[in-house]
Image (spheres, rainbow, N blue to C red):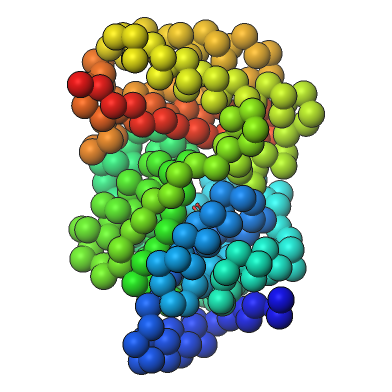
Amino acid sequence: MADVKAIQTVSEMHRVADQIRADGLQIGLVPTMGFLHEGHLSLIRRARRCVDRVVVSVFVNPIQFGPQEDLEAYPRDFERDRVLIGDSGGDLIYAPDAEEMYPEGYASYVDVDGLTRHLCGTSRPGHFRGVTTVVTKLFAAVKPHVAIFGQKDAQQAAVIRRMVQDLNLDVEVLVSPTIREADGLAKSSRNKYLSPEERQEASVLYQALQKAKRLVADGERRSEVVIGEMRELIERRPLAQIDYIEAVDTAHLQPVEEFSGEILLALAVQFGKARLIDNLVVQTA
Ligand code: PAF
């Protein structure tokens, strides 16, 4: 497989995107921060099935990391990513550097209200502003007809859908299922930070979500009880530090007291250097 071409400037990306569109072809974008895993590859494969040209962006976006977060340590391996992208059906990589994206004097941001208030919005102030800003800039550069995100970042997907709707962006947003390890741990670039002991304990996140699903299937409707049981299970793991466990409605991501309709159960738990998130959508009558 020949190396996939990497475009590093906005102007070149515009030129290539305009040419693809002028040829009457559809563009699909898979936005990533690189260090790809099977979850990303499933998005690229889906894009391959939907559109004529698949662009994968690889950009570790500094403005979505807080000052105490892992921007510097975030894993990077561009040559490995390039091979994986080619093998999974990607046609082009868009990999600008931080100066290209945020040159001296940069001052414009995109902020989605409401949906960003809970869950990761509470513990990562400014995170979603960074995500929505960079995704808008990626859309502007790549000009995709379709963009694909992962359900593991359920809040991110909801925020981006809201932004696309509110700003009348002409992009179809698709969300693909979470890809998991054999023991249920959601695939994530941050799993690399886990020590063998932390990695072993981290499967408790999936177990807690499955436990919640069983409780709801058995008729439990009180969020407090469901969340309490999840908390109790996770707290049995000495290396786990819970950031949040929340039950929110899928439309507005506001906390609910009773399960009714479609509920997103979402959690964030720190294991050493790795802050892991996961979620499950539960349907109730
Ligand atoms: O999900 C991610 O990897 C990032 O938040 C995204 C969407 C690529 C924006 O930097």
Tell me the quarter of the image containing the C terminus: top left
Total tally of numbered discs in the picture: 0
Residue furthest right in the image: 196
Residue 101 in view in this figure: no
x, y percent for residue 169: 26, 67
Looking at the image, is 165 positioned above or below residue 218?
A: below
Residue at 40% across / 41% down in the picture?
Answer: 154
Residue furthest front in the image: 49
x, y percent for residue 71: 63, 51
Looking at the image, is 240 positioned above or below residue 12?
A: above
Residue at 38% across / 41% down in the picture?
Answer: 155
Tell me the quarter of the image containing the N terminus: bottom right
Looking at the image, is 233 positioned above or below residue 98?
A: above
Residue 91 in view in this figure: yes
Residue at 72% across / 42% down in the picture?
Answer: 192
Q: Nearer the viewer, residue 4 or 65?
A: 4
In the image, is 251 to the left or to the right of 216? left
In the image, is 27 to the left or to the right of 199? left
x, y percent for residue 87: 66, 67
Residue at 47% across / 60% down in the picture?
Answer: 46
